[in-house]
């Protein structure tokens, strides 16, 4: 089965996102501050601590869980888009994109709140909030697009299966 162009592009985008995230995580953990301070989320969470419901270590653990979850979703989506002939992987991709859509959506809301209500404009805090809002919005849109593509392809497959079943029975 030939993969549609949209699926091919999404597969490479997911692979690129995964490699970029792993590379940035590697850089942030091997090169000391102030290098790439804008992508250091623990610094951001420490600055936002007075405005968060929990202490910043709790927020850090939530961030780490979301990061691991999103890396997993990225790998699943990338694999399912590269091996597009597997109906099972397409279903898994659609489900993971659907769940991730809500998780990343909550992250977008958190960073939007941080940008609008916590940090004064021009500060490092607001720059970090704007950066993370942009990244999380990109991931949100990517998840939505992946879900739509998965569902469109699965819908076409279901339609073909129904036609075959009707021809067999009819």
Image: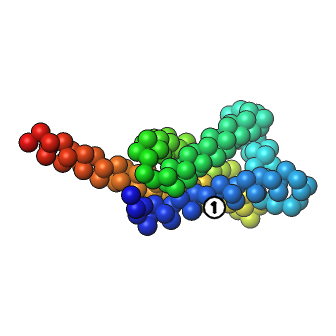
For the question of whether residue 50 can be seen, the reply is no
- For the image, the number of numbered tags is 1
Nearer to me, 8 or 122? 8
Q: Nearer the viewer, residue 48 or 70?
A: 70
Residue drawn at x 71%, y 40% as measured from the top left: 64
Mark 1 surroundings: few (<14), some (14-19) or many (≥20) residues within 10 A = some
Q: Is residue 145 left or right of residue 18?
A: left
Percent position of residue 104, x then y:
56, 47
What residue is pinned by disc 1? 16
Q: Residue furthest left?
A: 170
Query: Mark 1: which secondary structure?
Result: helix
> What quarter of the picture does the N terminus occupy?
bottom left
Q: Nearer the viewer, residue 34 or 71?
A: 71
Point out residue 167 in the picture as x, y percentages from the top left corner.
13, 46
Type of colouring: rainbow
| Image-based side of 97 in relation to 111, left or right | left
* Residue found at the far front of this picture: 168
In the rendered view of the protein, which quadrant contains the C terminus? top left
Residue placed farthest to the right in the image? 32
Q: Is residue 127 visible?
A: yes
Viewer-proximal residue among 34 and 80: 80
The quarter holding residue 15 reads bottom right
Give left or right: position of 123 versus 98. right
Picture coordinates of residue 86 (x, y %)?
A: 44, 47
Q: Tell me the residue at 74%/39% (across/down).
A: 60
Residue 14 locus on image (x, y percent): 58, 57
Which quarter of the figure has residue 137? bottom right
């Amino acid at each position: 089965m030939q993969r549609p162009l949209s699926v091919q592009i999404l597969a490479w985008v997911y692979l690129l996102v995964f490699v970029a995230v792993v590379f940035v995580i590697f850089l942030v953990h091997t090169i000391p501050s102030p290098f790439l301070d804008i992508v250091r989320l623990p610094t951001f969470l420490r600055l936002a601590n007075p405005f968060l419901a929990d202490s910043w270590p709790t927020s850090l653990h939530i961030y780490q869980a979301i990061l691991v979850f999103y890396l997993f979703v990225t790998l699943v989506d990338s694999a399912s888009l590269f091996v597009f002939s597997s109906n099972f992987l397409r279903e898994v991709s659609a489900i993971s994109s659907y769940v991730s859509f809500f998780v990343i959506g909550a992250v977008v809301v958190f960073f939007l709140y941080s940008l609008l209500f916590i940090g004064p404009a021009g500060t490092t805090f607001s720059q970090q909030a704007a950066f993370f809002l942009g990244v999380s919005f990109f991931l949100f849109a990517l998840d939505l697009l992946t879900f739509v593509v998965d569902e469109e392809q699965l819908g076409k497959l279901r339609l073909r299966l129904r036609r075959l079943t009707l021809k067999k029975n009819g």
